Amino acid sequence: MQKIRKGDTVVVLTGKDKGRKGEVLKALPQEDRVVVQGINMVKRHTRATAMTEGGIIEKEASMNVSNVAHIDPKDGKPTRVGFTVLEDGRKVRVAKRSGEILDK
């Protein structure tokens, strides 16, 4: 079970986008990387194809999962993630800072 998943809201801890918040668009657990909306933007020179026109496009590049942290639902600050098992047997992610459940 991974700590950061698609759809989570995270804050960037290091790099040129430090302090910015965004939603995880794609999680790549095998490579320990995530793609965050509007963060780590890079320019790509693309050739025109039948589906797309050519030119310079800007898109999000992946970044290491260690450079982002969950946002605590209670106070909006970065938090680490732990796991706990509920009474009904479900294993859920929990914010270490406040103890709030992060899974829906």
Image (cartoon, grey):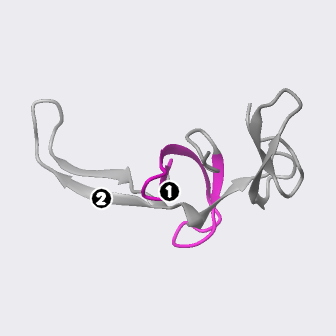
The vertical placement of 21 against 92, above or below, is: below
Taking the spot 60% from the left edge, 68% from the top edge, the residue there is 18
Q: Position of residue 85 (x, y in %)?
A: 82, 39
Asked if the residues shown at circle 2 and circle 1 are in contact, with their CB atoms under 8 angstroms apart, the answer is no
Of the pair 97 and 10, the residue shown nearer to us: 97
Question: Left or right: where does residue 55 sit relative to residue 21?
Answer: left
Amino acid type, residue under disc 1 in the picture: Ile
Nearest the eye: 54 or 60: 60
Q: On the image, numbered disc 1 is attached to which residue?
A: 39
Furthest residue toward bottom: 15
Considering the numbered disc 1 on the image, is that residue within a helix, a strand or a loop?
A: loop
Q: Position of residue 90 (x, y in %)?
A: 77, 32
Q: Which residue position holds label 2? A: 43
Q: Secondary structure at mark 2?
A: strand
Q: Reply yes or no: does residue 52 show up in magenta.
A: no
Give the magenta part as a residue range. 9-37
- The residue drawn where x is 86% and y is 52% is 75
Q: Quadrant of the C terminus?
A: top right
Image location of residue 98, percent across then percent down: 89, 53
